[in-house]
Amino acid sequence: MPVIPLPASTRAAATTGAPLDATPVVVRDPDIAPEGYRLDTGGERPTIAAADDAGEAYAATTLARLADGARADGATRLPALVIDDAPRFAWRGLMLDVARHFHPVETVLELIDDLAALKLNRLHLHLTDDQGWRIAIDARPALTGIGASTQVGGGGGGHYTKDDWRRIVEHAAARHVVVVPEIDLPGHTNAALTAYPELAPAGVVPAPYEGIEVGFSTLDPRNEASYRFVEDVLGEVAAMTPGPWLHIGGDECLATPEDDFLEFIRRAAAIGAATGKTLIGWHEMGRSHDLPPGTIGQYWNLTAPQEDHAEHLLAFVAQGGRAILSPADAAYLDIKYTEDHPIGLIWPGAPTTLEDAYGWEPTEIVPGLGEAGILGIEATVFTETIVDRDALRSMVYPRIAAVAELAWSPRPRDGRPRDLDDFRDRLARLARRWEADGLRYERVPGVAWPAPRTSRADEAGADPAATLDR
Ligand code: TNX
């Protein structure tokens, strides 16, 4: 079953099932796969069978979309169907960078709702970077003092208090989304160094940074105080986070000499593992052969791997871990849609269209990495150019639907490509809901998008351009 169900009108048995408003009967069935479900819409009441709460929730989502489709067709009953559905990958994620531009709690809560609606189950928050530190650490108050006061382009920053964090993780858990905090180490640490300059390598005087370069900062790997800092931070983040994962970054450490990098990763990973969490690192961390067993590698290089990036990812699997795939030319939702798109970066070399986001196969990226080595896939949204909720929505939608479908739906048999036209048709139907919810998405070419809904602001006589799509 694709993550976006087919419209009811295309189904042979349409409108002979349960009435649209019938409350489903829910049963537990331990033989159904984790997060999977069986949905039978044939009787007077739909039946949902699932092994767990997530499967039950995903069945309810599919049922709601089927009802949307039937209603749009003017039907009063559901199509009579039996759907056996379960995810291909256990890890179906989105990463949001709240460091380059801070995004408030409400934006994050809404994003979690969006993820759950597409059967995505991980929200990775990139909480720290050169331009800002966004999470309260009681033992290190300056991190959210001076360290949180900046962001790309200026205009102030922000951070999450421990109460904010609790709201985020609880909201997520109620929607079967696990929050994964990332503390990026030892590079991407300029904001931390402005707060605690004694952790910078000797001779480096950190100044606040609000540009978009990468790779210039590092905690001093030769200073014992750096490891006490890592202990304080990872200890508190682990304690306040109910999920089992802790991401420690490790990417783009261009200012850390290789030997120092390897020693830092060995020690920081041991500190992280001692919290009891399973660690995740960007694939460069695979340069280390001293990773705690089971450490997960996240791949950010291209769908056609360059240099030694694939080798570094495979080193995680060799050390007992698995891979999360986030290829930058397909799953980076901060990359421009077109060369002249007003928002976004274009460092992978070309824009990322909806078709690019949909047109890749996870097992065909890193030679030697098969289905068993792949924990799942994750889209990312770095926010150098993404300043607010509307900009975020316009970059995330519709490409997130492509990533969600690759994460959930089975690979087409016989290695055939996925049916792009079918995906576009289903997407056009789904967008009616986005219109109804009044949320911004990018009306990329190739999809028969629904007519834009007249906004409330428009009805009130305000400037329609403020809320309508470009
Ligand atoms: C690469 S991918 C980064 C980030 C940037 C992003 C922009 C990775 C691990 N690092 O530092 O924000 O590109 O797309």
Image (spheres, rainbow, N blue to C red):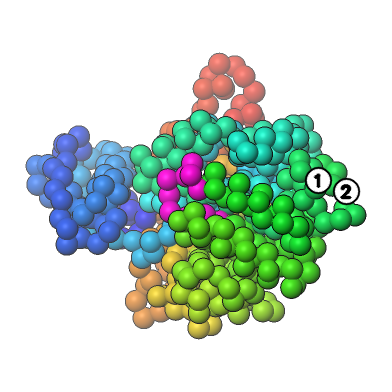
What's under tag 1, amino acid-wise? Pro
| Image marks 1 and 2: residues in contact by CB distance under 8 Å | yes
| Placement of 130 over or under 156, stated as above or below | below
What element does badge 2 sit on?
loop
Quadrant the C terminus occupies: top right
Query: Which residue bears the numbered disc 2?
Result: 205
As displayed, is residue 458 above or below residue 110? above
**Residue pictured at 52% horizontal, 26% vertical:** 455
> Position of 343 compared to 298: left or right?
right
Question: Which amino acid lies under the numbered mark 2 shown in the image of this protein?
Answer: Val
Q: Is residue 374 above or below residue 354?
A: below
Q: Quadrant of residue 269?
A: bottom right
Residue 121 at what x, y percent from top left?
A: 41, 51
Q: Residue 240: within the magenta?
A: yes
| Label 2 beta carbon less than 8 Å to ligand 1 | no
Q: Distance of mark 1 from mark 2, alpha carbons?
A: 7 Å
Report the quarter where the N terminus lies.
bottom left
* Foreground of the two, 380 or 45: 380
Residue beneath the point at 43% across and 66% down: 375
Q: Is residue 14 magenta-colored?
A: no
Q: Which mark is residue 413?
A: none
Rendered view: 368 above or below 453: below
Residue lying furthest top: 460
Q: Residue furthest bottom?
A: 368
Q: Which residues are magenta?
A: 238-247
Q: Is residue 199 left or right of residue 316?
A: right
Instruction: Judge by depth and name the residue closer to the eye, 402 or 29.
Output: 29
In the image, is 215 to the left or to the right of 125? right
Residue hosting label 1: 197
